[in-house]
Image (cartoon, helix red, strand yellow):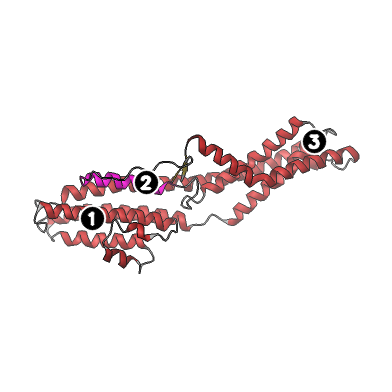
Amino acid sequence: MIVRRGTGFRRGLRKFILRNWGLIVLVLITVQAVVVVQKYTNVLQTDVFSATAVGLLATVVGIFIVFRFNEAYQRWWEARILWGGLVNESRNFAREVTTWINPARVPRVRSEREAREIHRTLIYRHLAYCNALRLSLRRQDTWDELAPFLSSDELHELQGYENKPTCISFTQGRALEALFEPDVAQSVLLTRLDGTMNRLLDIQGGCERIKNTAFPDEVRFISKAMVWLSGVAIPVAFLTTNTELHALEVVAVLVIALSFMVVEQLGASLKNPFENEDNDTPMSSLCRTIEIDLRQQLGETELPPPIEPVDGVLM
């Protein structure tokens, strides 16, 4: 899902505060502790807690967190590119089916009425494929959503397969092959359609690679630990020369510490773009876009509405 407009900002801010109240409390306690220690002892008067030392630590933390964010963003952006490709290839598939499968080009299609029935079956099966890929990536088990697009026999056959999008793709391939005779002209048409089917499977494979390649837990643990460490070190560096607490210094310390956490958590929210969360790829909306486009190519007029954002979030 993708956050949209202003309501998404308020939603994100609320979630950020709820997730990071512990770090905020830690920074405030550290600030007060530093002031008290400075007032009664000289234990913090050492180069270990100097601004230079803490600045080096902050630099290391910043580089590490930015690296993690970049890796997560690349996964998120690749997922969006793959689903954009799915939309385009779906339109190509519908165009090829409705343009090439007709009595003039395919002798096994005996009438225009039969051609329209074939167009509808192939395109609806493709819509089932797109929605099956969405459900598979989100690990959702609501396969009844495919019922409007598949026959009862095909829907029943799916239950025995682990990878349901692949099963639908194989069924589609066999249906296309059965339409064409083994001569040169029809082999060219079948090859073109087969090329589109192969590109769709490439998109599916790319999505499954992102889904099944876990982001290392060690990276997540280390980045979070370094952020919390900076939440202690930064107040020490700021306040070792003062024995009085100033509101501006507290605000500055909080802003610096939380800025690290913002980047760290943003990376965490982007690293798995198929988990049905706020910043995920809006697969439900894209599937609906594909459905509307392809059913319009069939000449249908009673179409479902586009999916709209809910509370600033697009599914």
Q: Earlier in the sequence, mark 3 or mark 2?
A: 3
The crowd level at tag 1 (other Cα within 10 Å; few <14, some 14-19, many 20+) is: many
Is any part of residue 257 visible from this angle?
yes
Residue furthest bottom as drawn: 160
- Residue 279: where, in percent of width, then height? 49, 45
Which tag is nearer the camera, tag 3 or tag 2? 2
Q: Earlier in the sequence, mark 1 or mark 3?
A: 1
Q: Secondary structure at mark 3?
A: helix
Assess whether mark 1 and mark 2 are in contact (beta carbons under 8 angstroms).
Answer: no
| Residue displayed at 30% across by 53% down | 127
Q: Which residue is mark 2?
A: 286
Which portion, as a residue range, is magenta?
281-299
Gap between marks 1 and 3 measured at Cα: 69 Å
| Residue displayed at 24% across by 55% down | 194
Q: Amino acid at mark 1?
A: Leu
Q: Is residue 64 left or right of residue 201?
A: right
Gap between marks 3 and 2 measured at Cα: 52 Å
Q: Is residue 146 magenta?
A: no
Viewer-side residue, 246 vs 314: 314
Which of the 4 quarters of the picture holds residue 210?
bottom left
Q: Secondary structure at mark 2?
A: helix
- Residue 296: where, in percent of width, then height? 24, 44
The crowd level at tag 3 (other Cα within 10 Å; few <14, some 14-19, many 20+) is: many
Gap between marks 2 and 1 measured at Cα: 19 Å
Q: Is residue 25 left or right of residue 118?
A: right
Q: Earlier in the sequence, mark 2 or mark 1?
A: 1
Q: Amino acid at mark 3?
A: Leu
Viewer-side residue, 70 vs 271: 271
- Residue 198: where, in percent of width, then height? 30, 55
Q: Which residue is mark 3?
A: 239
Q: Which residue is mark 1?
A: 122
